Amino acid sequence: MKTIIHKGAGVTAFCIISLFWLSTIFVELFGSHEAVAFVKRSIVLGMWIVIPAIITTGITGTILGKKRNGKFVERKKRRMPFIALNGLLILVPSAIFLDHCASNGNFGSFFYAVQGLELAAGALNIVLIGSSIRDGLQLSTSFGQAE
């Protein structure tokens, strides 16, 4: 059961972070300021889903990792602190700041500098979580059954 929860939470986090990132790119390229504000608000609200998903992934991964070793497990363990710190120190504060600015119509150069930082940090988490999913699949013996 822990393996199923771990996989579900990890995929949920990956998909939502990817959706946040793609929505931001799309709305910045093609949307109005009102659309940007809507996406920024949606991202802040979506954190109520993605943060518990990442926490659940970390907790279940720690529990599952105690029973295993090997290069894939070690790589997953090394990535998790970076994923968590990136989210806690860059992504969450950036999302809140950008939502505040966008809801007040403040789209100055500092908004776009923080937006760039958020996109870079988000891309990093997408790569790190995606790499952990790949390594998790390597740990599976067949179609979702863990070793």
Image (cartoon, rainbow, N blue to C red):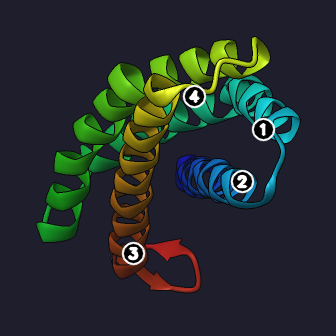
Mark nearest the camera among 2 and 4 is 2
Residue 30 at what x, y percent from top left? 78, 60
- Circle 3 — which element? helix
Badge 3: residue crowd in 10 Å (few <14, some 14–19, many ≥20): few
The Cα atoms of the two marked residues, 4 and 3, are separated by 21 Å
- Image mark for residue 134: 3
Q: Work out whether mark 4 precedes mark 3 in sequence or the reverse, and give the earlier one.
A: 4
- Up the image or down, 137 lies above or below 132; here it is below
- Image mark for residue 39: 1
Residue found 34% across the figure and 68% down from its top: 131
- Circle 1 — which element? helix
Tell me if label 3 and label 1 are in contact, CB under 8 Å. Answer: no
**Residue at the disc numbered 4:** 51
- Circle 2 — which element? helix
- Image mark for residue 20: none
Badge 4: residue crowd in 10 Å (few <14, some 14–19, many ≥20): some
The Cα atoms of the two marked residues, 2 and 4, are separated by 18 Å
Q: Work out whether mark 2 precedes mark 3 in sequence or the reverse, and give the earlier one.
A: 2
**Residue at the disc numbered 2:** 23
The Cα atoms of the two marked residues, 2 and 1, are separated by 7 Å
The Cα atoms of the two marked residues, 4 and 1, are separated by 17 Å
Badge 2: residue crowd in 10 Å (few <14, some 14–19, many ≥20): some
